[in-house]
Amino acid sequence: MTFPSPIEILIKAAPYIIGGKQIDIAEILGLARSGMMSGEGVLDEKDIALLTLKKKLGAVVVILGTRDTGKTELAYRVAEFLDKPTFAISPEQKPHPTFIQNVKIVDMDKIPNNSTVIFDDLPVYASNRDYNESIVRAIERIIPMVRHERHWHLIFCSQSAAQADKYVLDCDMAFLKPLGLLMESIERPGVGKIYKDKVNQWFQGKSEEFIKKHAYMLSRSFEGLIAITKVS
């Protein structure tokens, strides 16, 4: 993707307003630098939806898709764009970009307000039932607080919505990648219908590389296929 010059952005973005306030030019430049902005030099509906997400005090983002479709990289990209202190809760404790700090589920209460927290495929790796139930209890307790007290942006990655707690599905934005070949039969009916009606056709017959670099974005103001670049 190519991006407009800072001067072009400054000129063409000036009229845009979110929530009664003019968009901060620094946020627009950050959107362009992050690789999440359209390349025409004008904010489109996708850009406005992403900036609206960023301006929220707290929000829930869901990323669905089978293994090896680039969910984690997308989570990193969204976190980088949100530009808050970022923490990741991952049973594998795998390496993350330098701006992301690993934490354990038991230390979740130590995460400061005004942060982004990535839950990376917890339902997939947490095979121990007691551990799984502790995750569910923690999520149920924390989600009602993210928008009003914690001011967290939560990013949940999961192989399907069937594996996600119902509280997670009360999200502000979703990014959808292909499900596993046999997962649609156990998917939640409402989510399965979204895949059938809106998502699957974009990925049918596409290469693994294409799938990793794209996602179907769903928000209240925009829905459609988007391209994804790696974190800087």
Image (cartoon, rainbow, N blue to C red):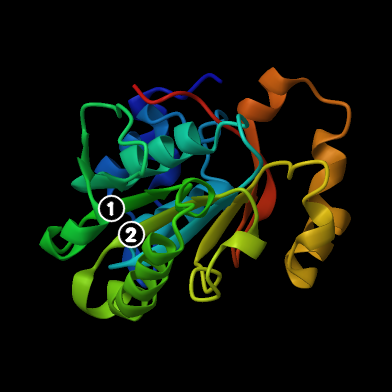
User: Is any part of residue 16 visible from this angle?
Assistant: no
Q: Position of residue 204 (x, y in %)?
A: 87, 34
Residue denoted by label 1:
116
Amino acid type at circle 2 is His
- Amino acid type shown at disc 1: Thr
| 153 and 168: which is toward the camera | 168
State the residue in front, 18 or 183: 183
In which quadrant will I find the C terminus?
top left
Placement of 64 over or under 32, stated as above or below: below
Q: Are marks 1 and 2 in contact (CB under 8 Å)?
A: yes
Residue on which the image places disc 2:
153
Q: Quadrant of the N terminus?
A: top right
Front residue (pair 222, 94): 94
Q: Secondary structure at mark 1?
A: strand
Eyeballing the image, is 193 above or below 80? below
Q: Going 67% across and 18% down the picture, which residue do you hit?
A: 209
Q: Relative to 18, is 117 on the left or the right?
A: left
Q: Is residue 48 left or right of residue 140?
A: right
**Position of residue 171 measured from the top left corner of the image (x, y, whole percent):** 51, 68
Q: Nearer the viewer, residue 61 or 138?
A: 138
* Res. 113 visible in picture: yes
Residue 80: quadrant of the picture: top left
Q: In the visual, does 111 lie left or right of 32?
A: left
For disc 2, the neighbor class at 10 Å (few under 14, some 14 to 19, many from 20) is many
- Between disc 1 and disc 2, whose residue precedes? 1
